[in-house]
Image: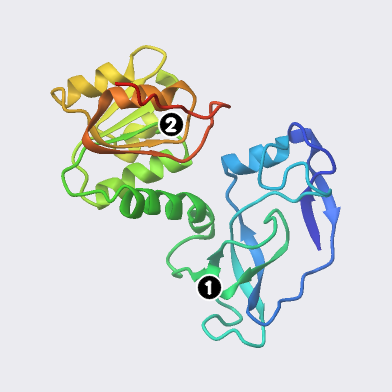
Amino acid sequence: MKAGGLFECGGPEVLQTIAMEQPVPGDFQVRIKVQGISVNFADLQTRKGAFHGGGAAFPVVPGLDAMGIVDAVGAKVTKIKEGDRVIAFPASGTYANYVLADEYLAFPVPEALAFEQAAACPLVSFTSYMLLAKVAELQKGETVLLHAAAGGIGTTAIQIARSLGAGTIIGTVGNSSKAGEALAAGADIVVSNEAEDFVTAVNEATGGKGADIILDPVGGTVTGRGMGCLAPYGRLVVFGNASGSYGEISTQL
């Protein structure tokens, strides 16, 4: 089979087609003929050598999720069968014709959902739901602030927050050209960081109370500044460092 991989870390130009052996499923695994994948920020970091295997033993094949059709199942697989349309989180990179996934990490896809739509869903939808529903424990009517609101997780989290009953949803974007993406996804207010201070904007929008939940994939100075617009008993959920540095919070009173 063929895969898209790299023998050195760098820009997009390091990706190349690699011939690899077609994988054989273990007892509890399914093999998926890949129909589509999503390109996530983690994939870019992998290519650059930052994490998720980047800089490990080459060749490295990026990719964390996939959508496809099951074409082989292990001897002890009971819930997935050949021919099923699934999204999955395979153990190895998904930039490939075929991937293996544990049965419990493969999920059926309704026939009504197109390949392209399904392929775009796995990582961003699972992550957004877990952050909002399980980590932050979003309650109906609460105000949510989402940084990087025009990105994959940002636009998905806006929609999931709305479906979970959020009140006001505020998004921040790097510049005004990205605001339309967040608004189209359902954000009530979008703050452009190049033109406004998000702390001031959030406090003004909430009458000084602040946001009940802040989802922060940016890190750096954004994390600490977020404390300035976090409501009493609010939840600040940090799940990345897209800025290139980890956020720090001062506990000095």
Name the residue beneath numbered marker 1. Answer: 104
Q: Is 30 above or below relative to 182?
A: below
**Residue 82 - label:** none
Residue 179 in view in this figure: no
For disc 2, the neighbor class at 10 Å (few under 14, some 14 to 19, many from 20) is: many
Q: Is residue 122 visible?
A: yes
Tell me how far mark 1 sits from mark 2, CA to CA: 31 Å
- SS under mark 2: loop
Q: Secondary structure at mark 1?
A: helix
Q: Which residue is mark 2?
A: 148
| 3 sits left or right of 108 in the view | right
Q: Position of residue 24 (x, y in %)?
A: 76, 75
Residue 26 against residue 147 in the figure, above or below: below
Residue 202 location (% of width, % of height): 25, 24
| Residue 39 locus on image (x, y percent) | 60, 45
Q: Type of residue at label 2? A: Ala
Circles 1 and 2: CB distance less than 8 Å? no
* Left or right of 212, for residue 207: left
Furthest-top residue in this view: 195
Pick the front one: 38 or 24: 24
On the image, which quarter does residue 233 sit in?
A: top left
Instruction: Locate the C terminus by quadrant.
Output: top left
Going from the N terminus, do you reach mark 1 or mark 2 first?
Answer: 1
Q: State the residue at coordinates (32%, 32%).
A: 183
Query: Front-most of 78 and 210?
Result: 210
Reply above or below: 128 against 97: above
